[in-house]
RNA sequence: GGUGGGGUGGCCGAGUGGCGAGGCAGCGGCCUGCAAAGCCGUAUACGCGGGUUCGAUUCCCGUCCCCACCUCCA
């Protein structure tokens, strides 16, 4: 029993075997960098980060690619707005007169910050659309030659994919052309069919000259879909293992990618994976609805590791609903895991050394192999924590050490261990050392008070520390203390 | 209208034709000077109506409701 993944194209769970033994090629859609990220973007990245980590744990070398769409209508529109006289930079929309490429780069960095803050590792390659004109030209030329694309008849310089020339069109989402709703505001322009989509967009006079490139069909810029087809096959070959992205990209984006790449003769993706949407109290979180929550807002409300736990805790295909209590619940769960590891470290010694026991429990493996059933895997993780806590209580250090190693490995696979977090006793900054000295002095006083049965005084010290965010817990071996995040205090 | 996914206990969220995951919150107990943490125990459940079955939350039919996509969207 190996890994099984749900393939959207066949709408079924399929045994996963890579094209090349031991090596997985994966492409997943990154952001159109037209604004700051919201948690929906990051959920997708977390989902694929977990997939990559699980594949690597399972022994595969993963060649991962995630694109950056750094040229599109909205980027140009937003940049154009910044040049207007009444543009208000204080609204947080960026500097006045910001060229489109500067704006795109600024938001690309914002995405990186969000990914980094949540322990989403960088893919092997992260190509930008603007750097791959040559590859797109080649793909478009092949399509025209094969009779599946045509320059618009209206002289606009546009080049369209001819959906009627490709009978398989609609296969990814199992839709028939005639069943598709006609867009009410469909502008036929020079199209043969309203559903034809642009591979190349002829330059318009309102757009900056820097946002256009010379092509065999005149100056212009690429359509969205062709970028991904061109970049995926450049880095992964004409046939590759997995293509991923958010469920909302299934149509038209991925449908169009599949159509154009198949029509050009490429095998393209063998598995299509789509992550579910993040909703806010039941409704899809999106820019257009305006109900988005940014990673920064979440990070202000909870520790990074708790945010990561929240975003990764549901099965990746299911909808993930955010509500106000979600983060504190996630944080409680994370701290349960962490406090076990911290106590295991204190009582048993280092558990992070390479260790045979550091493999994941069988139940965890089965859950992850079953289309990344993270909720079931987390159940195993929590069961292991419980067993570990019991072993610590029984002073069974051999068992506790083994459980701790397993827990560590599981948190690594889920990416929790990699989340930058400052909740640590081993923080070695001078400030932390000073704090530790002060706290430990107070705890020594408190211990003395306890010996003298002066519990009022002991409790006063504990309250005093709690008031400044230092939690104190007594144990057989003395008091432990830890810093509480500000958000966790009343 | 077309396509796909859902409705599980106070909340989140897995899963299965019959022994009721897990987390969070609650309750009782152990531990503790008291707490906290931890451990043990514990209640509340599978939208609704039928059907198949010895037995259905799980399969089938019907029905209601929700969500996503069909337009830029992770």
Image (cartoon, rainbow, N blue to C red):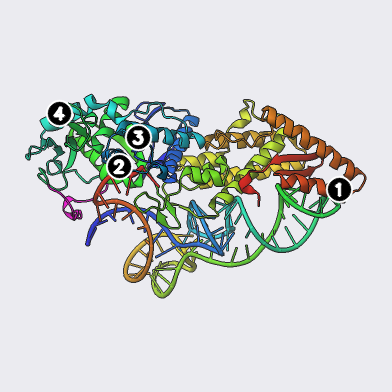
Q: Is residue A400 magenta?
A: no
- Counting residues from the start of the chain, the first of labels 2 and 3 encountered is 2
Label 1 vs label 3: CA separation?
A: 58 Å
- Counting residues from the start of the chain, the first of labels 1 and 2 encountered is 2
Nearer the observer, A311 or A350: A311
Label 1 vs label 4: CA separation?
A: 82 Å
> Magenta residues?
A172-188
Label 1 vs label 2: CA separation?
A: 65 Å
Nearer the observer, A89 or A307: A89
Look at discs 4 and 3 and give the one toward the viewer: 3
- The residue lying at 12 percent from left, 30 percent from top is A217
- Residue A457 point in image, percent of width and height: 86, 48
Q: Are marks 1 and 4 on the same chain?
A: yes
Evaluate if marks 1 and 4 touch, with contact meaning CB atoms under 8 Å apart. Answer: no
Evaluate if marks 4 and 3 touch, with contact meaning CB atoms under 8 Å apart. Answer: no
- The residue lying at 16 percent from left, 53 percent from top is A178
Q: Secondary structure at mark 4?
A: helix
Look at discs 4 and 2 and give the one toward the viewer: 2
Q: Secondary structure at mark 2?
A: loop
Q: In this figure, which residue is indicated by the disc labeled 3?
A: A103
Q: In this figure, which residue is indicated by the disc labeled 2?
A: A85
- The residue lying at 23 percent from left, 34 percent from top is A226
Report the side of A177 relative to A298 (left or right).
Answer: left
Q: Are marks 2 and 3 on the same chain?
A: yes
Identity of the residue furthest to the right in this view = A452
Q: Chain of mark 1?
A: A
Q: In this figure, which residue is indicated by the disc labeled 1?
A: A457
Magenta segment, prevailing SS (helix, strand or loop): loop
- Residue A68 point in image, percent of width and height: 34, 33
Q: Is residue A178 magenta?
A: yes
């Amino acid at each position: 029993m190996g890994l099984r993944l749900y393939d959207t194209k066949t709408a079924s769970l399929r045994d996963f075997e890579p094209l090349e033994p031991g090596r997985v090629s994966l492409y997943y859609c990154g952001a159109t960098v037209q604004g700051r990220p919201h948690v929906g973007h990051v959920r997708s990245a977390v989902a694929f980060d977990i997939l990559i980590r699980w594949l690597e744990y399972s022994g595969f070398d993963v060649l991962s690619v995630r694109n950056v769409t750094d040229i599109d209508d909205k980027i140009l529109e937003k940049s154009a707005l910044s040049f207007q006289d009444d543009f208000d930079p204080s609204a947080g929309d960026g500097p006045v007169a910001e060229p489109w490429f500067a704006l795109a780069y600024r938001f690309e960095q914002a995405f990186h910050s969000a990914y980094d803050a949540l322990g989403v590792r960088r893919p092997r390659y992260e190509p930008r659309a603007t750097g791959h004109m040559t590859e797109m030209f080649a793909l478009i030329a092949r399509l025209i030659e094969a009779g599946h694309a045509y320059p618009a008849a209206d002289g606009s310089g546009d080049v369209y994919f001819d959906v009627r020339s490709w009978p398989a069109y609609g296969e990814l989402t199992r839709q028939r052309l005639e069943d598709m709703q006609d867009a009410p505001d469909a502008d036929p322009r020079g199209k043969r069919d309203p559903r034809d989509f642009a591979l190349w967009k002829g330059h318009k006079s309102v757009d900056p000259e820097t946002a256009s490139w010379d092509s065999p069909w005149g100056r212009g810029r690429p359509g969205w879909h062709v970028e991904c087809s061109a970049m995926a096959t450049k880095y992964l070959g004409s046939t590759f293992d997995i293509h991923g992205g958010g469920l909302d990209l299934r149509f038209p984006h991925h449908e169009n990618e599949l159509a154009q790449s198949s029509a050009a003769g490429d095998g393209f993706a063998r598995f299509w994976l789509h992550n579910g949407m993040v909703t806010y109290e039941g409704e899809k979180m999106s820019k257009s609805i305006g109900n988005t929550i940014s990673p920064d807002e979440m990070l202000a409300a909870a520790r990074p590791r708790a945010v990561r736990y929240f975003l990764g805790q549901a099965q990746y295909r299911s909808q993930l609903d955010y509500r106000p209590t979600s983060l504190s619940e996630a944080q409680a769960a994370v701290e349960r895991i962490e406090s076990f590891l911290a106590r295991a470290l204190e009582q048993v010694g280092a558990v992070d050394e390479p260790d045979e026991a550091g493999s994941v429990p069988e139940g965890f493996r089965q859950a992850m192999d079953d289309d990344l059933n993270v909720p079931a895997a987390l159940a195993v993780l929590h069961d292991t924590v419980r067993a570990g806590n019991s072993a610590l209580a029984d002073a069974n250090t051999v068992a506790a050490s083994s459980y701790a190693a397993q827990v560590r490995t599981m948190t690594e696979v889920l990416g929790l261990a990699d989340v930058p977090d400052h909740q640590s006793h081993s923080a070695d900054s001078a400030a932390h050392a000073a704090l530790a000295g002060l706290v430990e002095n107070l705890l020594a006083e408190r211990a003395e008070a306890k010996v003298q049965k002066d519990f009022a005084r002991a409790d006063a010290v504990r309250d005093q520390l709690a008031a400044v965010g230092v939690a104190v817990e007594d144990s057989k071996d003395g008091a432990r203390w830890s810093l509480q995040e500000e958000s966790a205090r009343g």
